Image: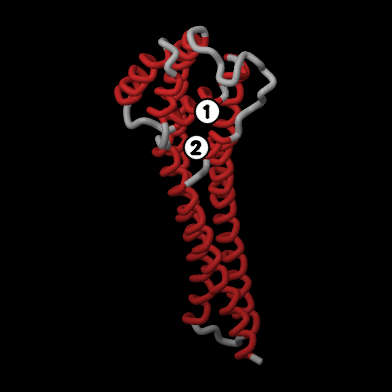
Amino acid sequence: MLLAEYSVYQMISDSTYAVLAALALWGLYQITIIWNRVGQKRFKSEDAQDAFLDDVEEMLVVGDFDGAAEYCEGDARGIPQMVNLAIANRELGYKRARQVMLDRFQRDVLSDIEYRLSWVGTMIKTAPMVGLFGTVFGMMGAFKTLATAESVEPSLLAGDIQVALVTTACGLAIAIPLMLLVANINIKISKMEDLIGAGLTRFFEAYKTGLTKSPSPGGSSMSAGLKTEPAAVYRQS
């Protein structure tokens, strides 16, 4: 009977450590994905983005949409993807093509980042709670040892207290670094949004000018509808 009780206690203790490890790994995995995604979607510097937009503007202002689309083809960064999508849907007109482009970026890029950040936030909240569960469970074991033994061996009591303290420390050790990483990620996301926003302001001016110099593909009809082929450029890696 004592062996069975010890086994159950040990199993729950080990399960608590396993859950904490899983929370840490899942949170770090999501952080890594977000970090890579943000780095993939933005230019390394504003100068690099300006150089790219200089080339695109030269083609757009003279109505060379095909050349601009070819120039952006295969580029995984956010600005080239949105430029390609706007060009492919230019028969919808300036306002509609612009809205389609922004909606697609919000849905396929920013929403994915927000989804993964919500998972990290859940790990940050859950890890201390699991650690608190370990604390309560460890103290229950310690009090049970005190209640059932006429003379308590310090080593048995120390084992219960160790579970209580270690699980609490592990929960905090998981949550605190994840909080710092999320703060850093949010700064990178803000910089990405600012950089892309500045680039889009330049692109829209050249795009609007180019629309007046190049006929819409397939004629002037606005009933052609939204093209779906360019959505491939937004597929997540």
**Circle on res. 233:** 2
Q: Position of residue 120 (x, y in %)?
A: 53, 48
Q: Are marks 2 and 1 in contact (CB under 8 Å)?
A: yes
Quadrant of the image for the N terminus? bottom right
* Residue 150 coordinates in the image, percent (x, y): 60, 87
- Label 1 neighbourhood size at 10 Å, few (<14), some (14-19), many (20+)? many
SS class, disc 1: helix
| Quadrant position of residue 12 | bottom right
Give the CA distance from mark 2 to mark 1. 8 Å
- Helix, strand or loop status at disc 2: helix
**Relative image position of residue 233 (x, y in whole percent):** 49, 37
Q: Residue at x 49, y 75 (%)?
A: 158
User: Badge 1 is on which residue?
Assistant: 85
Residue 98 visible in the picture: no
Question: Taking 112 as reference, is 81 above or below it?
Answer: above
Is 156 or 131 nearer to us in this picture?
131
Say what amino acid the circle numbered 2 marks.
Val
Going 52% across and 28% down the picture, which residue do you hit?
Answer: 85
- The mark that comes first in sequence, 2 or 1, is 1
Left or right placement of residue 191 versus residue 146 in this view:
left
- Residue at 55%, 56% (x, y): give it: 127
Residue type, numbered disc 1: Leu
Would residue 109 be seen by someone viewing this image from the given angle?
yes
Residue closest to the far right: 223
Residue 78 pos. (x, y %):
45, 31
Q: Badge 2, how many Cα within 10 Å: few under 14, some, many 20+?
A: some
Foreground: 108 or 57? 57
Q: Quick one: 201 or 208, which is closer to the camera?
A: 208
